[in-house]
Image (tube, helix red, strand yellow):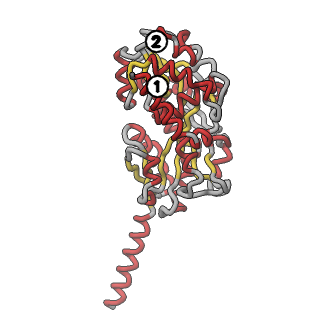
Amino acid sequence: MKHFLNAAAIGLCATFATGASAEVIHATWGGGGARTLADYVQKPFSDQTGIATRVVEVPNTAGAVRAPTASQYNAVTVTFFEGVGLSDTGLLEGFTDEEIPEVKNLPPEVVIRNEEGLIVGIPTYFAYYGIVYNSDLASADDFKSWNALADPKWKGKLAVTRPVYASAYDLTMFAHANGGDAANIEPGIDLLKGVIGNALTTYTSLAHMNTLLGTGEVTAVPFYSTRAWHLQREGQKNIQIVIPEEGGLMLAYAVVAPKGAANREETRQYMNYLAGAESQVAVSIEGGGIPTNNLAKLPQDYLDTLGTTREELMKKMYVPDWKTVWEHHEERINMVEQLMSEAAK
């Protein structure tokens, strides 16, 4: 009898251990995005499936994927170009189209696949890079073109981001605006030099840039649509964003699954949920983004806060070859650092 009870107890413990281990742990940046993910994505997913979920905040999400401890996470949010850079490293779990059926409702160009054609990155929403400005100091007409940022009248009135992003985002967009592309960034260099020359400062964080815009220390900056949306929602109606005539840079954010992590089936279900319209609408409404799922229907009151529709935005978006951007990332960071160093002399 004693042996039977011991065996039963061991079996019961194993059952609980198995249930407890069936958890999806999602690493992302700290702040409001993490809270939105927990409240508006993970909670409804867990309610529907019974699968436990948890958010872990990390300072460098792509770095977390490359770390030897990456398998402690089941899902990680990364910038799209970082996801593309990770796609063929062997560090990401691959899924077939049958395993992620919602993939059929996503634009093919924003689904990250490895060399074998397996899905390794799910784009959950997108923002865009436009020109954000303080409407007390400038108007949308001042920035009909990206090239307007190099006008000497903005000397000391702009800001520029750190080289790691200026090399991937600003330089790529500036090249496109002047007839180049991700492979040919030469046409964008002079414009980047002009922006750097007009910049009062290099901003070090989103909060830093929010302050500079709000106080009017900076008139305009190439910046994220989601940040403009958040500032407006917080009452700063004088912060506006314009998409120049050459378009805005589409910035999708992707979720990847580190290879070797436990609970692959639970993670698969979670990844498919992230690709679906329901979760994408929820996270967009709370974060100021746009769903990548083509079936997503945003409520009219939210569209009113954006001032446009998803379909109209998509027509204005430039989607570069992010693989090329990634392949040249290090050399372009070095180039931008040199440009900034020269401007500071």
Q: Residue at x 66, y 41 (%)?
A: 109
Camera-side mark, 2 or 1: 2
Point out the image quarter for the C terminus.
top left
In this rendering, position of residue 317 left or right of residue 19: right
In this rendering, position of residue 294 left or right of residue 212: right
Q: Is residue 149 above or below residue 101?
A: above
Q: Residue at x 51, y 22 (%)?
A: 193
Label 2, label 1: how far apart the Cα atoms are: 24 Å
Q: Residue at x 67, y 24 (%)?
A: 179
Q: Position of residue 158 (x, y in %)?
A: 44, 18
Question: Can residue 280 be seen from the camera position used here?
Answer: no
Instruction: Identify which residue, 74 or 274, lies in the foreground.
Output: 74
What amino acid type should be assigned to the residue bearing mark 1?
A: Trp
Mark 2 is surrounded, within 10 Å at the Cα level, by few (under 14), some (14 to 19) or many (20 or more) other residues, namely some
> What secondary structure is found at the residue carrying circle 2?
helix
What amino acid type should be assigned to the residue bearing mark 2?
A: Trp
Residue at label 1?
A: 229
Q: Earlier in the sequence, mark 2 or mark 1?
A: 2
Instruction: Identify which residue, 125 or 256, lies in the foreground.
Output: 256
**Which numbered tag is attached to residue 216?**
none
Residue at label 2?
A: 154
User: Residue 181, located in which quarter of the rendered image?
Assistant: top right
> What secondary structure is found at the residue carrying circle 1?
helix
Point out the image quarter for the N terminus.
bottom left
Instruction: Identify which residue, 87 or 16, lies in the foreground.
Output: 87
Q: Position of residue 163 (x, y in %)?
A: 46, 33
Instruction: Identify which residue, 269 or 323, lies in the foreground.
Output: 323
Count all numbered tags in the image, as a single digit. Answer: 2
Q: Residue at x 66, y 43 (%)?
A: 105
In this rendering, position of residue 237 left or right of residue 146: left
Q: Is residue 14 above or below residue 121?
A: below
